[in-house]
Image: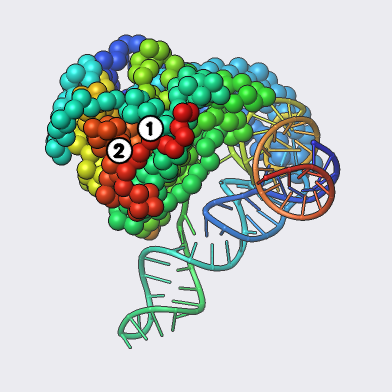
Amino acid sequence: MLDLGFVRSNLELVEKKLRDRNADPALLLGDFRRLDAERREKITQLETLKGRRNELSERVGALKRQKEDASALVEEVRGLKETIDADQQAADAIDTQMRALLTRIPNLCRDEVPVGRSEEQNVEVKRWGTIPNFDFQPKPHWELGEQLGILDLERAAKISGARFAVYWGDGARLERALIGFMLDRHTREHGYTEVLPPFMVNSKSLFGTGQLPKFAEDLFHCIDPEGFEPGQYRDNDHWLIPTAEVPVTNLYRDETLDEARLPIALAAYTPCFRSEAGSYGKDVRGIIRQHQFQKVELVKFTRPEESDLEHEKLTRDAEAILEALDLPYRRMLLCTGDTGFSSTKTYDLEVWLPGQSLYREISSCSNFESFQARRANIRYKAKGGKSAFLHTLNGSGLAVGRTWLAILENYQQADGTIRIPEALVPYMGGQRTITPRAGASL
RNA sequence: GGAGAGGUGGCCGAGUGGUUGAUGGCUCCGGUCUUGAAAACCGGCAUGCCCGCAAGGGUAUCGGGGGUUCGAAUCCCUCCCUCUCCGCCA
């Protein structure tokens, strides 16, 4: 959420930045100036009346204490009541309008973010690793996984539906090995503290990180007694998390952190649940796009002046995992049109998938600056200083399911077996190869 | 799920209708004192919004929402959360 005062005094800039994002300022901002003026006028009017009421009530109290007659004053205040009630309603209504307007405005991209309409305009910042050369036709992971008997999409469809996966044997172990490997790297070498949050959150949390109200249809939400009403955020309803970003960032919702504690760096493994509404027909083969996938997420809370540096470091921490696994990747700086709603600047890491001959997103690292902190009311305060909103950042470190399939495709051998990346061998109990599962006629 | 107790400012903790945004203590900040520190003493210390160039003023907030009243932290309704006991259960 942008600050109302900021929008008021930087309206032209906000409009320009929205156009950069392919958003329509007229649609998002409406007649902002008029709404803002009207809101302030209504509030001033209401508060003047309330001041009058408070003043008179105080005098009533004074008279009554002296056992004098106050009925004339009581009558006068009673007369104010109707006007105040009406003004209150009007002020509430217009304030709600303003809040709704502000909560639907996306964050503004930083100036160094390239202006562009779609992912076509994303800029490749760097490329790492050597694309493997195969003396045979490399296969996509869905063929490899099925032949090895470690990936079972058919039974997943039976027990849960499309876009789910069952992992068997070494497939399941590889997923678990990746989770352990990533968490160990981040906690032991990159300075993150591990957290294991709930996999369900309430709507207040989803508002805090920006998924609600705009992206409700992308989420799974549980059947609670009361449904979801945009604009009303409760602390007792339940939604499956689409990413650990939500529970972890909201850990500090409505808190003021001591500046000395910053930056705070947290790493969390969770499954992630996404409805994938609107992606029908997209990525239907394999496990690229699933309703449930596992992810290790990195989240940081920083002072405003250091968020930029921490963003670079966090992105490097994610890259370090790809490098440790020797998976070729490239780093993309997303253009304005492809940058997420809450982000000011996002790097995507894309891993090379030889089975499909393309780079595919495996991590997304964003700096939200104070956008989420303002929505979630997360502040920091220096000793003796004033409290202010801190900056939040996060990135995948990495998407486990996509790392799993990247390993299958990059480490496949002519006979269809999979070599285990060196760094992962200890996590696989010393095992160096994935061979067809014994008795795996599925 | 049943019964009971409770939710007050960074923390502890007073406060059952009238200058209570809220006594007091602690923490923290500034100052006096001191060679320095501690102690002691003095002062300061919530947030949002509105008016204002500013100084400052107003308004709202005592878990959330609603109600009663001229006036609510205090009374009523409702929801949420925490704790204790019982039941059920991984």
- The number of discs equals 2
Image quarter of residue A404: top left
Q: Position of residue B4 (x, y in %)?
A: 83, 47
Q: Do the residues labelled 2 and 1 touch (CB within 8 Å)?
A: yes
Kind of residue at disc 2: Ile
**Closer-to-camera residue (A336/A107):** A336
**Closer-to-camera residue (A305/A142):** A142
The residue that mark 1 highlights is A148
Q: Position of residue A111 (x, y in %)?
A: 18, 30
Residues beneath discs 2 and 1 located on the same chain:
yes
**Closer-to-camera residue (A128/B79):** A128
Q: Is residue A4 visible?
A: no
Q: Where is residue A58 in the image (x, y as percent from the top left)?
A: 66, 38
Q: Position of residue A419 (x, y in %)?
A: 28, 41
* Residue A191 against residue B27 in the figure, above or below: above
Residue at 54% from the left image edge and 35% from the top image edge: A200
Residue A215 vs residue A313: left or right? right
Residue at 38% from the left image edge and 35% from the top image edge: A436
Q: Quadrant of the N terminus of chain A?
A: top left
Residue at 34% from the left image edge and 24% from the top image edge: A143
Q: How crowded is mark 2: few (under 14 residues within 10 Å), some or many (20 or more)?
A: many
Q: Which mark is residue A418?
A: 2
